[in-house]
Amino acid sequence: MSITHPSFGTLDDDRVIIFDTTLRDGEQSPGFSMNLNEKIRMAEALTELGIDVMEAGFPIASIGDYEAVKAIAESIGQRDESPVICGLSRTGREDVLRAADAVRPAQRKRIHVFIATSDLHMKYKLRMQPDEVVEATIAAVGLARQHTDDVEWSAEDGTRTDPDFLCRCIEAAIKAGATTINIPDTVGYAVPEDMARIFTMIRERVPGADKVVLSTHNHNDLGLAVANTMAALRVGVRQIESTINGIGERAGNASLEEAVMAIRTRPDAMPFKNNVNTQNILRTSRLLSTITGFDVQPNKAIVGRNAFAHEAGIHQDGVLKHASTYEIMTPESVGWQKNSLVLGKHSGRAAFRDKLNALGYGEIGANQLNDAFRRFKDLADRKKVVFDDDIVALVDDEVMRDHERIRFVSMDLYAGSKGPARAELELAVDGVTKQAVATGDGPVDATFKAIREIFPHEANLVLFSVGAVTEGTDAQAKTTVRLEEKGKLVDGQGADTDTIVSAARAYVHALNKLLVKRVRTEPQALSA
Ligand code: KIV
Ligand code: ZN
């Protein structure tokens, strides 16, 4: 029987709603904080990707979260083709009202209310009795329904919840007005058989379960998040919650690109449809890596550098004769483009722009394009051949710096075996250029001291690593710097043909991320 949903109307039986939580569950994982502009850029890319519901944040968690959800609801949420904009909320009255306020400007809006239902969580975390959890569910869902017809209720730690109690809570949530029921595998403990058992039970036992959308939300602690998501789909679930690149708490969430491509590649096993424009997958993945500074591993399915690379001679031979011998989907279907154009110092802006498109950077704005092009010309003067990896490093470095409070301007360095190293550094802080000169035990020490002089802070340097982007002595260095402040860790990346400049850029990037993190971890800040 088809379901009539307040945001989507009558849903065909085979329609799967793609709920993206990159900006909420994904963003709350260590090192992945984004500032407002970065969230808006990501939200634009997710909209172009064609997701159905965008969980834009957890409005009560921090001022930053509230403002981001509101800004997304005000901009993207008011367009005709917008996804449903969703805000997360615990069951408290203040939480629900805050979420309602943040999503209000959107044409289609959802409040997502969650509460833990497992014995373990109720007893030790919530310190609530089961009856109180049911009461809280009814009150919160009812309140949310006063603000929007589209209300999702989640049973946190649902897969470890007593089945009878889970059914009781779901029934209460549906009666109170929930239109989507989500069962998270919060700690990534479930196996695919659990999905079949739990959702079949819900469909058989809970009155009204056939009138709402059932949803699955899987964490990847055992590497089973996508498998569990697929298992849930096969037993009647019609909303999947996932994130780009699988980012999220601990080992992350089910990866959106893997789930969507599994459905698309295996219609025989998963005969479902969704609205994702798969050709946009790579660029969305790249944008997220660029913004957060975390690349996916080379062998990551769909979006990893090696996902469509064939190394073994037999494989290469097979692919050349007939691609489907070793390729189960085409690289182009997820946004990879064949492009052998090599750039050099005579290449113009149009060729550079084409190259960026081919590399999945279609989202880059005009200012960043100009800055990146200037840096590319500079690099091409210093380096004989500019490889794709050089451009990726350079653009990432440029895009990451957009909207940052502290920006690297220039530096001079005096180092050698005869005495202390000396760094003369220029940074722009909130648009004001500042200089410092510092000496230190080696060039890196001197540089980092100069940064500290310009922008005093207490963070400790806990990791410093340098690698080459490509081969050769003229290769760019890519540096990672990890800073720690009050137990919070942030990673920054920088790239340059000069190793120390790349280190300075990485340190400044980490510092900027720390500033975002400070706002997100103000005393009242929370995560789900
Ligand atoms: O994993 C989880 O339980 C969650 C809920 C807040 C939906 O993210
Ligand atoms: Zn989660």
Image: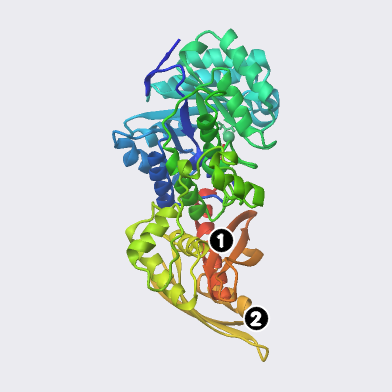
**Residue at 58% from the left image edge and 16% from the top image edge:** 169
Q: Between residues 176 and 304, which one lies in front from this camera angle? A: 304
Question: On the image, which quarter does residue 448 sit in?
Answer: bottom right
Q: Relative to residue 208, is residue 48 drawn left or right?
A: left
Q: Between residues 282 and 220, which one lies in front from this camera angle? A: 282
User: Which residue position is annotated with label 2?
Assistant: 442
**294 is higher (above) or lower (below) than 325:** below
Q: Which part of the image, by quadrant, shows the N terminus?
A: top left
- Residue 242 screen position, x and y as percent: 53, 35
Classify mark 1: residues with Cα within 10 Å, few (<14), some (14-19) or many (20+). Answer: many
- Residue 222 screen position, x and y as percent: 70, 36
Q: Which part of the image, by quadrant, shows the C terminus?
A: top right
Q: Secondary structure at mark 2?
A: loop
**Residue at 68% from the left image edge and 27% from the top image edge:** 190
**Residue at 47% from the left image edge and 31% from the top image edge:** 18
Instruction: Count up the numbered dots.
Output: 2
- Residue 410 screen position, x and y as percent: 46, 77
Classify mark 2: residues with Cα within 10 Å, few (<14), some (14-19) or many (20+). Answer: some
**Residue at 45% from the left image edge and 68% from the top image edge:** 407
For the residue marked with disc 2, what is the amino acid?
A: Gly
Question: On the image, which quarter does residue 51 sit in?
Answer: top left
**325 is higher (above) or lower (below) than 388:** above
Label number found at residue 492: 1
Q: Secondary structure at mark 1?
A: strand
Residue 242 visible? The answer is no
